[in-house]
Image (cartoon, rainbow, N blue to C red):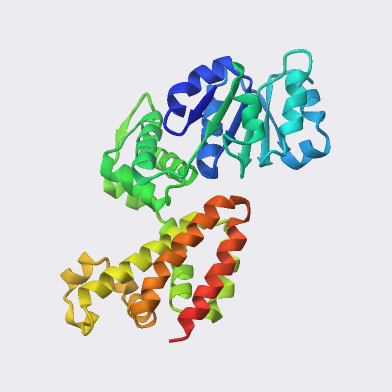
Amino acid sequence: MKATQRDFRQVSQRAAEQCSTFFFCGPDEAGAAAAAAHLITLLDDPGERVEMSGADLRRDPVILGDEARSGSLFGDTRYIYVRANGDEALDAIGNHLLAEGEGCPVIVVATSATDKSRTAKLLEKRKDALVAMFWPPDLATVSANVRQMADAAGLRLNGDLAERIARGANLDVRLAQSEVTKLALYCDASPQSPKTVEAADLEAIGAATEEDGFMPLVNAVLSGETGKLGRELARMREHSMNPVGLLLAIERRAAQLAQITAKLGPRGSLESMNKGEKAQLGIFWKEEREIRNQLTRWRGDRLERLGPRLIELHRALITNSQAAETLLAQDLVEIARFASRR
């Protein structure tokens, strides 16, 4: 059985009832992990969670089949959750499928793997297995997912607020789910007692604030503040910031600089704009100093080259999700050094 992010929700219930091996893959790691978490909730009695790594299975390809057929310490049901990279789990899954006796559910979330990988090909035609492929989502898709999350949590959420949460989570469905969960607790909502969400509720819980967490690093890079950059990159690692989400924040600021530059023309300045004109360009008082500085560093050819450079980096992060943090840090250092030279 095969699915993508477009139809996973429609086939997930049937897959949970019919399948025992699940392979979640694709460049959208967050989407794959969120889908795996959703599927677990659909299992009849998931029981104890046993976590294994792809590296463990590569070293011992027999252990998965043995573990899937061994009993829980307390005699309860169980399922196995595997975090793998590429086809690390291929031989182990093959042995598991060949082993005698019924095993517990096996859920594999594989980064750097696609539905064209050998593991996916091994499973896709089996009636007792699901291969689910997840591409990077767009805003409309994540907004729709947020509304589904809200419905399940007993929240009545309009489209604008769902989009706001999706944007704030930088299209990461795991972060969006966290915000919806916090919102349900704040509103004391449940499926049995649904509540309508207002914009003030989002503001009260501080929802959709990851963008604010990105901005010190965004500003250090685009303002060429190399002295601050090391500290900000360390913060990025300590807080496990989403590399793609962080890059999206930089791309948005670069696009904003291009929009402002086009509005100002060759001889214009921010001083000539009133508050309303600045607001239309997304320039607010707490960001104006940084934007003013960045406009002096990114002009003409420099600004024109920045956009394609960021797009190229974005593709590299999607293609090499396992090394995304390292790739991003390396490129941000280069961009900051370039910005530091006026």
Can residue 86 be spotted in the picture? yes
The C terminus: image quadrant? bottom left
Left or right of residue 117: residue 92: right
Can residue 188 be spotted in the picture? no
Residue 184: give x, y in percent of width and height.
40, 38
Q: Quadrant of residue 75?
A: top right
Query: How many numbered tags mark residues here?
Result: 0
Residue 230: give x, y in percent of width and height.
59, 74
Say above or below: 236 vs 76. Answer: below
**Outermost residue, top side:** 101
Left or right of residue 55: residue 248: left
Q: Quadrant of residue 39?
A: top right
Residue 341: give x, y in percent of width and height.
47, 86
Q: Quadrant of residue 181?
A: top left
For image coordinates 18% across by 72% down, the residue present is 275
The N terminus: image quadrant? top right
Residue 265: give x, y in percent of width and height.
21, 78
Q: Viewer-proximal residue, 75 or 80? A: 80
For image coordinates 30% across by 45% down, the residue present is 161
Q: Viewer-proximal residue, 107 or 212? A: 107
Left or right of residue 278: residue 186: right
